[in-house]
Amino acid sequence: MKLQNVPGDLFDLAGETGLSRELLRLWQVQSGFPAMEHSDEGHSYFPDWQVRRLRSIRRLIALGEPPARLFELEEDELAALLEYRTRAPAGIVATPAATTVAEYVVMLGSNAFAEVEAAMQSHVVEHGLEDFVVTVGAPLCTAVGLAWEQGRVTIAQEHVFSDLLVRTLRACVSTLFQPFGHALQARPRVLLCTPPGETHVLGLAMVEVMLLLQDCRAIHLGAGLPESEVVRAAQDIDADIVAISFSLAHHPARTLAVLAALDASLPSRTDIWAGGNNVGVRDGRGTRISGFRSLADIPSAVEAWRQRQG
């Protein structure tokens, strides 16, 4: 029996499943799973059924399922639960979060930064990373901006909030997940950026997390990149999608101009996703430009892109 393209250690298994080595090692100690098998020649490896099971577990954790109960389910039960969670009617309401957006703002205004960070981490544990991004991260960004305008939080407190949010996202991603082994070839390949003069990158950080949870390849170019550089980068990496974020402060006319320039210059096969609260972000029906007002729309947009590719 010759083993090819099968994970032979935790490092390989992490790359194949997207779960961190630290988490896999912890599960091994606690439950004995994942467990290595041995070929006739004495080579150690993790079989395909364990890889498939761990991939399903990874996705379900992202959707908010507690990891402990998932180990009790067989592969077909995991698949059924995953189908239910991804196709559940929109009317189903999740369990309310322990900390509301308004309470986060009050804590920030009181310099209770440790409590803010603890509440963020607790939400991820109880409800999942995807739920945190959609129901806490995105609305909280808007609420904190409004609170600053009203004088309820200072510039310094707003900056601390930004750091806490980014730190929470990175910590949760690094603890739970890492890119799949095929990440360099994963599709869609999405280029993330903001236009010149646009320095707000919290939206992109959350988009990056949502794409990671959909097993996409996200490449973050950062803030304030000229359209010509975005086009060049998209050509160099063969980007499937350019996702560009516009804050409310970006001039709407300039937003439309940037989108028009990208539409005229990007390769014909590259879609354009425009996101943010800016009034210049338009739907773009009949063109390759799609406007996004909610991070919750990203999973269905990724699925639609993949279906179009066959």
Image (tube, rainbow, N blue to C red):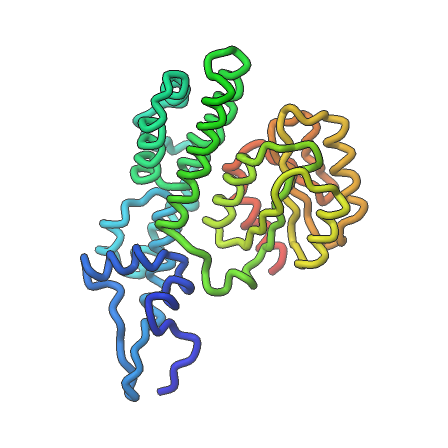
Give the camera-side residue of 25 and 81.
25
Q: Is residue 96 visible?
A: no
Spot occupied by residue 129 in the image (x, y as percentages of width and height): 39, 41
Question: Is 8 left, or right, of 198 in this rendering?
Answer: left
**Looking at the rendering, which quadrant does residue 1 occupy?**
bottom left
On-image quarter of the C terminus? bottom right
Which residue lies most toward the front here? 156
- The residue at 66%/47% (across/down) is 242
* Vertical order, 140 against 232 (above or below): above
Spot occupied by residue 149 in the image (x, y as percentages of width and height): 55, 14
- Total labels: the figure holds 0
Spot occupied by residue 86 in the image (x, y as percentages of width and height): 42, 46
- The residue at 37%/16% (across/down) is 110
Give the camera-side residue of 55 and 227.
227
* Vertical order, 288 against 256 (above or below): below
Q: Is residue 205 visible?
A: yes
Question: Is 12 left, or right, of 195 in this rendering?
Answer: left
* Vertical order, 235 against 66 (above or below): below
**Looking at the rendering, which quadrant does residue 261 occupy?**
top right
Question: Is 236 left, or right, of 45 in this rendering?
Answer: right
**Looking at the rendering, which quadrant does residue 44 occupy?**
bottom left
- The residue at 41%/58% (across/down) is 18
- The residue at 33%/70% (across/down) is 9
Question: Is 181 left, or right, of 85 in this rendering?
Answer: right
Spot occupied by residue 71 in the image (x, y as percentages of width and height): 24, 56
